[in-house]
């Protein structure tokens, strides 16, 4: 996501929330890391399904 | 031979029909009544609304599937229930009005031994003046045709931006009592992604309007997750995403009236404000599909079967106790009507005992807080469990429903798309357990911190794709459909 200078306006609603670092943002679309997360999330979801 | 009639062929009704038919084989009859000719995987309507998919990819004709499986299908809407029958028809029955092109408007009756109400919501665009695609100024993604209409208007906005015009895009909830904020949230971030893809993001002012107390509530009071050594509320990561994608938000807001290119909303502090827009997608509030019910003497007993909001009463606690006394035990377990034990309601059609998010009213007395969501995974699970219970009772294996599917003892997985692309798209992947917070078992946050999780990434987009094709495959009753979980 392209960063804009206006992303943070002092004391406005966009001033306070945490935002991802470049590394975190990169991990979100890195295919290798995301393939690993794909497996993890699927396992979590299967556990969830089996709980009922 | 017993007959089970299922009203509605959405996620819960269709799931119930397939499972009941499988359990009852051909010894008994499972009949489906739905006014729609097509089954629609509603979660993917979001992608129809941004042109990533078309109607044909998210729907299929129900009649050939039911013919293949051996389930009689009536394209009709149910209009009245006679749970005791009457003098002419001693068996319980429903009145139907055909909606298919061949028998449009014809009336008929269907007797039943067991009845499942899975009619889903009635979309109440009429609750806010100027809301909705038919008689208003906003678009919707509640149905595939609404989503197609939304995309046509969105394309016009994108064309204007390409010519250098600025556009005000407003997405969210169109009334103070809306639910399904997650769907609007998905649409917002898919629209935002589409703007970037077309290189016009800098020409769009994106605004989210919501009846939630805080972002990330989603009608469930939000959820707490472990992240970075802290237990944080979903508000934190939702506000983070909004800030990262440069989306302004208006919260605690109930939209009161919409005109061409502007609308008025009221916030919890009682103030009214105006917001302009060039393109807007706002969800309507839901009520139950209207039915009338009559006893053997022909007296109207609608209020015995249905709550005032039109949803069907089931085995829940409807005493209307205050928020502080709410309990997970208030929520239904078997979805059986308390008056007529051969009638059940699943999915959106059952009347929830109370909200999940704490109710709130503005200083003027206007209710502005989400009603509880009960779509997707919980709907499918309810449909399956109720089908199994009815099959057991029909076959004499049980006298009463044995299997339970309370939302207070059920988890949910939710994938909210935030940009549709196989390589650089993202989605918010959330799991939670239980859906209804249980502060007795989980005193800290009401939910298990082990099974309540949330993260953003490309993996979520892949999973949403997988779910799309998996559930379309399953709903078509293709070989081994039943090994795909609800």
Image: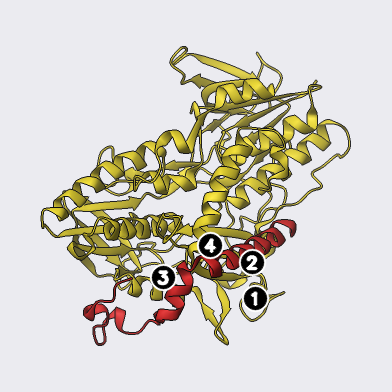
Chain colours: A red, B yellow
Q: Quadrant of residue B176?
A: bottom left
Same subunit under labels 1 and 4?
yes
Residue at the farthest left position: B164
Discs 4/3, front: 4
- How many angstroms separate mark 2 from mark 4 (CA)? 10 Å
Is B256 left or right of B439, judged from the image as shown?
left
Kindly identify which residue carries mark 1.
B449
Pointer 3 local density, CA inside 10 Å: few below 14, some 14–19, many at least 20? many
Kindly check if marks 1 and 3 are in contact, taking CB atoms under 8 A apart as contact.
no
- How many angstroms separate mark 1 from mark 2 (CA)? 16 Å
Q: Is residue A28 above or below residue B354?
A: below
Residue A36 locus on image (x, y percent): 60, 67
- How many angstroms separate mark 1 from mark 3 (CA)? 20 Å
Q: Quadrant of residue B451?
A: bottom right
Q: Chain of mark 2?
A: A
Pointer 1 local density, CA inside 10 Å: few below 14, some 14–19, many at least 20? some
Kindly identify which residue carries mark 3.
B215
Task: Out of B123 and B298, give the one closest to the viewer.
Answer: B123
Q: Is label 2 in a helix, a strand or a loop?
A: helix
Number of marks: 4
Q: Is residue A1 above or below residue B36?
A: below
Image mark for residue B459: 4
Q: Is label 1 in a helix, a strand or a loop?
A: loop
Residue B25 locus on image (x, y percent): 79, 26
């Amino acid at each position: 996501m392209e960063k804009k200078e206006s992303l943070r306006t002092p004391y406005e609603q966009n001033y306070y929330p945490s935002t991802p670092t470049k590394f975190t943002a990169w991990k979100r679309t890195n295919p290798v890391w995301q393939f690993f997360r794909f497996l993890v999330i699927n396992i979590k979801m299967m556990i969830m399904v089996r709980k009922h | 031979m017993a007959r089970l009639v299922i009203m509605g062929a959405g996620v819960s009704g269709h799931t119930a029909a397939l499972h009941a038919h499988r359990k009852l084989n051909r010894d008994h009859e499972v009949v489906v009544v739905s006014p729609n000719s097509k089954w629609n995987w509603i979660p993917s309507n979001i992608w129809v609304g941004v042109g990533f998919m078309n109607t044909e990819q998210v729907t299929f004709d129900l009649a050939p599937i039911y013919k293949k499986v051996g389930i009689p299908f009536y394209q009709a809407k149910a209009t009245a229930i006679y749970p005791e029958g009457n003098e002419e028809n001693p068996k319980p029955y429903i009145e139907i009005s055909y909606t298919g092109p061949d028998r449009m408007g014809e009336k008929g009756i269907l007797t039943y031994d067991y009845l499942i109400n899975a009619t889903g919501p009635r979309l109440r665009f009429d609750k806010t003046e100027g809301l909705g695609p038919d008689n208003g100024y906003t678009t919707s993604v509640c149905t595939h045709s609404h989503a197609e209409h939304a995309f046509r208007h969105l394309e016009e906005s994108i064309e204007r931006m390409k010519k250098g015009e600025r556009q005000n895009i407003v997405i969210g909830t169109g009334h103070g009592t809306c639910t399904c904020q997650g769907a609007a949230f998905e649409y917002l971030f898919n629209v935002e992604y589409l703007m970037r893809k077309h290189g016009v993001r800098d020409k769009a002012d994106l605004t989210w309007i919501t009846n939630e107390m805080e972002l990330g509530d989603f009608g469930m009071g939000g959820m707490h997750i472990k992240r970075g050594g802290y237990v944080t509320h979903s508000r934190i990561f939702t506000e983070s995403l909004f800030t990262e994608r440069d989306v302004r938000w208006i919260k605690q807001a109930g939209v009161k009236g919409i005109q061409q290119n502007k609308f008025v909303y009221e916030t919890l502090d009682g103030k009214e404000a105006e917001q302009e827009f060039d393109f807007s997608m706002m969800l309507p509030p839901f009520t139950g599909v209207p039915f009338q019910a009559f006893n053997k003497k022909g007296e109207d007993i609608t209020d015995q079967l249905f709550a005032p909001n039109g949803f069907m009463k089931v085995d829940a606690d409807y005493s209307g106790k205050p928020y502080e006394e709410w309990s997970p035990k208030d929520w239904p377990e078997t979805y059986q009507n308390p008056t007529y034990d051969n009638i059940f309601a699943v999915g959106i059609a059952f009347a929830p005992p109370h909200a999940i998010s704490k109710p709130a009213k503005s200083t003027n007395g206007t209710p502005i807080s989400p009603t509880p969501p009960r779509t997707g995974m919980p709907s499918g699970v309810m449909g399956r469990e109720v089908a199994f219970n009815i099959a057991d009772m029909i076959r004499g294996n049980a006298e009463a429903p044995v299997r339970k599917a309370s939302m207070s003892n059920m988890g949910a997985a939710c994938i909210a798309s935030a940009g549709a692309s196989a390589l650089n798209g993202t989605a918010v992947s959330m799991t939670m357990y239980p859906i209804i917070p249980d502060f007795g078992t989980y005193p800290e946050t009401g939910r298990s911190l082990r099974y309540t999780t949330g993260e953003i990434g490309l993996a979520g987009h892949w999973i949403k794709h997988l779910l799309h094709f998996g559930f379309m495959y399953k709903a078509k009753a293709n070989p081994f459909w039943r090994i795909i979980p609800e």
